[in-house]
Image (cartoon, helix red, strand yellow):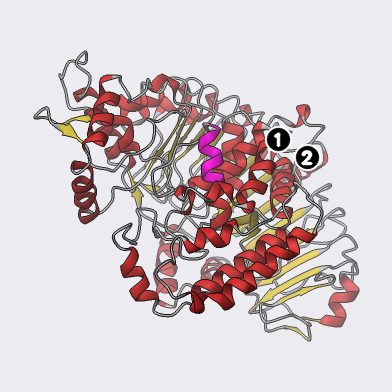
Amino acid sequence: MNKDLVNLDLEFFQSKPREELQTNLERLDNVLKEERKKKYDPKISSKSLADIKKELLKLNQQISSINSLSKTFSQKAKVRPTSSGSSDRSAVHGLLNIHQIESFPLSSIYSEIQVFFNGLDEKRKFLLSCFSVFPENAVVKRRILVYWGLGEGYLLSASDTNGKTPEEIVDEILWEFQEKGLIEPAIRKRQMQVKSYRMDPLVRSAVIKLSQGADLFDYDSKGNVLPQRYWTLGKDSKGDPEVKVNVSFPRPRCDRMCLLKAEDEEQEQEQEQSSQKNPSIQKENLQRSSSNSATNLKELITLFNVNEPFPDLELAWLAKMKDKNDENVPHMKEPKAEDWLSKMENAKVICLGSWPGSVKSHVEVENTEFFKGLTNCKSLRFLSLQGVSRIIELPESIGNLSNLEILDLKECHNLEVLSEEITKLKKLKYLDLSDCYLLARMPKGLSTLVELRVLKGFVISNPQRKGSPNLDDLRRLMNLGKLTINANSRHFPTEKDLHALQELGENGALRKLTMAWGATLADQQRDANTEAQNGGNCGCWKKSKSAQKQAPKKQNLQTEKLPIKKLEKLDLQCFPNSTASWLTPDSLPDLKKLYIRGGNLATLDRISNWSNVQALRLKYLRELKMNWREMNISFPKLEYLEKVKCPGITLCPCDQHGVWMKNPN
């Protein structure tokens, strides 16, 4: 390594007296000298990267009069929040748009990341580049990488990967990135398994340049993925050049398009003034327009919403602008979102909702008319509407997406009806209905979706309601490895339900099971309001107690002892009864992870031995009583314990987060 990074910083600190920087530069130079002593290794040293980052942070923090220094650079670039919620200034050391600095590609850090990037296969390059799509310092969950990778065909089925699941493949790749210092776990406390990550802003700057060079994504001058408006640059209604932004790079080349929230009015005015002062930029954009720079929408394979709150309205606007700039299109009607989507015939991934791990922002659609445009997307594999409000039901046209493998409807809070046409999606492998609180029942015929591997949010309605689907309808789903159940009845699981779970575990692939109990819809709404007033804590206590009041106190129908063989993880939420005879080591012989959150459970069968359980999470359990000595006897192989607000569980050597680990290092 060399002093390229020092020189890079000096480009922006020329106005400061040398003596104010000398001490800090010497410290950074010592780190670089240590690196020169080492034998050259094309692999990235995560320790050296962390040390350099630390010294750069100190350098930035210790410079005096930072406010006056910012004023000096205000003519070069004005620091303000971007549409993604981050700022134009890098979080590493205050440099502006580091990826655009001419000397950055000459730095050792960039060179090392470049060597690593060029040695990756296409699958790893894609997954690493995905981190640059999200805002700086964003928390990226593994789930979106799995879904996106599957949607674009980078992750093959288990039969083609020596039995490894897509989740296991992504975990291995993320571990490689973590070992190289490219990403880091985004956790606040010790955990056994990491499922969310952050990318260092300095690394992100390098990945932006490398990703653009590989035609994976395109970016604007501030390092954001190319906003949708660049795809429709042209002329306004008066025939004048419609130039709103300072563009200094080639037209969009990649076949992935992202939706970003429109920038504030003040920023748009500044950008327009800047572009008007530079005629060459106007000329370049006009050349793009005349050469149909909007790109044939048939070439798009991905449409990803980064932070646009009204995706269907934005797509309607894009369709309008594209038609206005296309003289061959008759202007017969007002364009709609479906007009844009209908032309994306080869799209494989369409994410209109929020992405897992994003800041909870409001996303809504005017209506579900945009689904009509999706009927032409015959190649669509991954459709996400996560967190989109005002979707009350899925239209029948959903059944036309014959190649769909992933349907993400998580947190669609207004969803009430799931069309039975969904049963036509014979290739569906992932169906996520988590947190769809108004969904009262499941459609008939889910047993025909034999390829399903993950089903979240399966609703068990009141058993008195005739014709309501139950777990017995899932017996044919032998590939189902993960199942999440929302039960609206305290009588769940019945003997019939336990038989179905036994068959799915013994003859099928069921390994992870989550069961959550809730009260009636009215009770849930009332408790949700109370919970919000109380700060959002322990809401399931109230739900479970509400459910308990609706039945005789002595009634307990949990009498079956049917083993759920091969089950490795069990997660119980708001269990309404004090005991469950099926919750024993004999019933769950292969269980490795046991999570219990809220409810009235009072015993874990301390007489028996949970010989295989390694991870135990207990939260908001007022009735459960056990001390550390008893826990060691009942769980002899315990390696991880997490307890939160369980007053009856005592003497456990947990840290301030309520976590104990056998081997913390």
The answer to whether any part of residue 494 appears in the image is no
CA distance for labels 2 and 1: 7 Å
Q: Is residue 633 left or right of residue 199?
A: right
Toward the left, the furthest residue is 238
Q: Is residue 426 left or right of residue 134?
A: right
Q: Is residue 235 left or right of residue 656?
A: left
Q: Is label 2 in a helix, a strand or a loop?
A: helix
Residue 557 on the magenta segment: no
Q: Tell me the magenta residue range.
A: 207-214
Which of the two residues, 2 or 278, is positioned nearer the viewer here? 2
Q: Position of residue 527 (x, y in %)?
A: 44, 69
Q: Is residue 40 above or below residue 597?
A: above
Question: If the image is split into quadrants, where does the N terminus sit?
Answer: bottom right
Q: Are marks 2 and 1 in contact (CB under 8 Å)?
A: yes
Circle on res. 663: none
Q: Earlier in the sequence, mark 2 or mark 1?
A: 1
Q: Amino acid at mark 1?
A: Arg
Which of the two residues, 274 or 512, is positioned nearer the viewer here? 274
- SS majority, magenta: helix
Q: Position of residue 350 (x, y in %)?
A: 46, 34
Toward the top, the furthest residue is 328
Q: Which residue is mark 1?
A: 475
The answer to whether any part of residue 449 appears in the image is yes
Q: Is label 1 in a helix, a strand or a loop?
A: loop
Toward the bottom, the furthest residue is 651
Q: Which residue is mark 2?
A: 503
